[in-house]
Image (cartoon, rainbow, N blue to C red):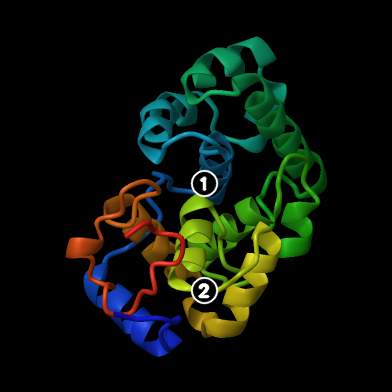
Amino acid sequence: MATKAPPISKLIAALNKTYPSAHCELNFTTPLELLVATILSAQCTDKRVNMVTPALFARFKTAADYAAAPLAELEKMIQSTGFFRNKAKSIQTACRDIAEKHSGRVPDTMEALTALHGVGRKTANVILGNAFGKNEGVVTDTHVIRLSQRIGLTKQKLPEKIEGDLMKLVPREQWTMFSHWLIWHGRRRCYARGPDCEHCELAKHCPRIGVKR
C-alpha cells in the first residue's frame, strides 16, 4: 500500500487509462453558455444544471439578452439550482460587463474574465480550459480539493494554494484534463464519504490520507 504520493507521471497514466474520455459534464455549445452553466453549478450538481440550461439557452442567446432580462424571470428559470437570487445577479452583471466592455464576446484571458462581476478564478479556469482550450490553471472544485489532499499531492487547505501546488506538479498541457480526471474519479469512485478503495483503480498509488481504514 502506498504511504506517500505517487510520482505524478504514474498517477496521470492511471487516471488517463481509467477515464480516457473525461470531459466537462456541463452541456454547452458556446463560451457564454459555459459561463452561465458554470455560475449555476456552484453548490449544485451538473445533472441539475443540465436540466435547467436548455430552456435558459433557448430564451437568452446573447450577453445583452441576459443583461436586459427581467431579474425575476431569470430567477424563476434557475430557481431549482439553489441560491438562485445570487446566481441570477452574477449572471446578469457578468453579462452586462461582457456586453458593454467586450462587444458581447466572452473574453479569453484570465485577467479579463476575473474582472467580470461574479466570476472568480475557478470559473475562469473552467471557461479558458474548456471553451478556449487554454491551460491557465487547474480547476479546484470540491472533488479536486478532496482528492489532491487524499492522494497526498498537497497539504494546503485553501483552493488557490492547492491550485498552486498542482500547477507545480502537473505538466501545463494537462492542467485542464487533470481536473477532469480528478472530478470524474471523485464522482465515480473516491466519494467524500465511504470511498470505494476496494475497487479503486488508483489504490496502489494512493496513501488514503484522512480515510478511515
Q: Report the amino acid beneath label 2.
A: Trp
Q: Quadrant of residue 208?
A: bottom left
**Residue 209 vs residue 53, the one in the foreground:** 209
- In 3D space, how far apart are the residues under numbered discs 1 and 2 (Cα atoms)? 18 Å
Instruction: Give the residue drawn at x 70%, y 33%.
Output: 90
Image height of 53 relative to 111, above or below = above
Indicate the secondary structure of the residue bearing disc 1.
helix
Q: How many marks?
A: 2
Sequence-wise, the earlier of marks 1 and 2 is 1
The percent coordinates of residue 157 (x first, y second) are 65, 59
Instruction: Please give left or right for residue 103 compared with residue 212 in the image.
Output: right
**Residue 195 vs residue 162, the one in the foreground:** 195
Instruction: Give the residue drawn at x 58%, y 72%.
Output: 154
Q: Quadrant of residue 196?
A: bottom left
Instruction: Please give left or right for residue 134 compared with residue 70 in the image.
Output: left
Point out which mark residue 34 bears: 1
Contact, CB < 8 Å: mark 1 with mark 2? Answer: no
Residue at mark 2: 175
Point out which mark residue 1 bears: none
Crowd band around label 2 with a 10 angstrom C-alpha radius: few (<14), some (14–19), many (20+) = many
Instruction: Give the residue drawn at x 40%, y 81%.
Output: 3
Q: Report the amino acid beneath label 1.
A: Leu
